[in-house]
Image (cartoon, rainbow, N blue to C red):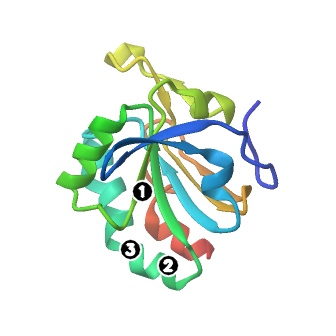
């Protein structure tokens, strides 16, 4: 079942690159008591994700926070080492928190996985964005096919 506006995020775990190595992140704790702009990309270092999706959130981080967002986070079905390297290369450190969903548990739990096997990607997360307020989805924007419209930072800004 796909998550929808008004639903509470399911409890899962992420891994994030930290200063002292990889850190486990409990989803309940991460989203508790704050407003998070969360976006999902099919993969780090992939064309649209690297050229437009992540850079948009890096560029608009201050504007999103000025509109009440406490944290901006990116999730992908990649390991935390890859997301850490991608964050550094995109100069996202300190602006966007990388939440690795290496096994796809979160993507599956929210019903937003996709089959990228015809491109050699296996099962990944779809491209989407959501606003999560204290663990509850208040806005959900899922892209159609290969589109990049409703999950952008600019679109999210218009929703806040």
Assign the N terminus to one quadrant of the image: top right
Taking depth in this image into account, of 22 and 109 the one nearest to the observer is 22
Q: Is residue 27 above or below residue 122?
A: below
Verify CB contact (< 8 Å) between mark 1 and mark 2: no
Residue closest to the far left: 89
Verify CB contact (< 8 Å) between mark 1 and mark 3: no
Give SS at disc 1: strand
Q: Is residue 87 left or right of residue 140?
A: left
- The spot of residue 35 in percent (x, y) is 63, 68
Q: Nearer the viewer, mark 1 or mark 3?
A: 1
Name the residue carrying label 2.
65
Taking depth in this image into account, of 50 and 26 the one nearest to the observer is 26
Taking depth in this image into account, of 94 and 42 the one nearest to the observer is 94
Q: Is residue 97 left or right of residue 29?
A: left
Q: Residue at x 38, y 14 (%)?
A: 118
Q: CA distance from mark 2 to mark 3?
A: 9 Å
Give SS at disc 3: loop
Name the residue carrying label 1.
97
Q: Residue at x 56, y 75 (%)?
A: 158
- The spot of residue 113 in percent (x, y) is 57, 29
Mark 1 or mark 3: name the one nearer the start of the chain: 3
Q: Residue at x 29, y 61 (%)?
A: 92
Q: CA distance from mark 1 to mark 2?
A: 13 Å
- The spot of residue 155 in percent (x, y) is 51, 67
Q: Is residue 121 above or below residue 30?
A: above
Q: Is residue 46 left or right of residue 95?
A: left
Q: Answer with the quarter of the image where residue 11 lies.
A: top right
Q: Is residue 124 left or right of residue 121?
A: right
């Amino acid at each position: 079942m796909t998550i929808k506006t008004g639903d509470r995020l399911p409890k899962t775990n992420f891994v994030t690159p930290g200063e002292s190595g990889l850190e486990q992140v409990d989803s309940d704790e991460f989203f508790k008591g704050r407003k998070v702009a969360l976006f999902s990309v099919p993969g780090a270092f992939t064309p649209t994700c690297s050229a437009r999706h992540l850079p948009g959130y890096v560029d608009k981080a201050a504007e999103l926070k000025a509109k009440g967002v406490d944290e901006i986070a990116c999730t992908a079905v990649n390991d935390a080492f890859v997301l850490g390297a991608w964050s550094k290369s995109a100069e996202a450190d300190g602006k966007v928190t990388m939440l690795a969903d290496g096994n796809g548990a979160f993507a599956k739990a929210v019903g937003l996985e996709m089959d990228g096997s015809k491109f050699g990607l296996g099962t990944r997360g779809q491209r989407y964005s959501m606003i999560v307020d204290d663990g509850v989805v208040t806005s959900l924007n899922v892209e159609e096919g290969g589109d990049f419209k409703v999950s952008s930072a600019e679109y999210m800004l218009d929703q806040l």
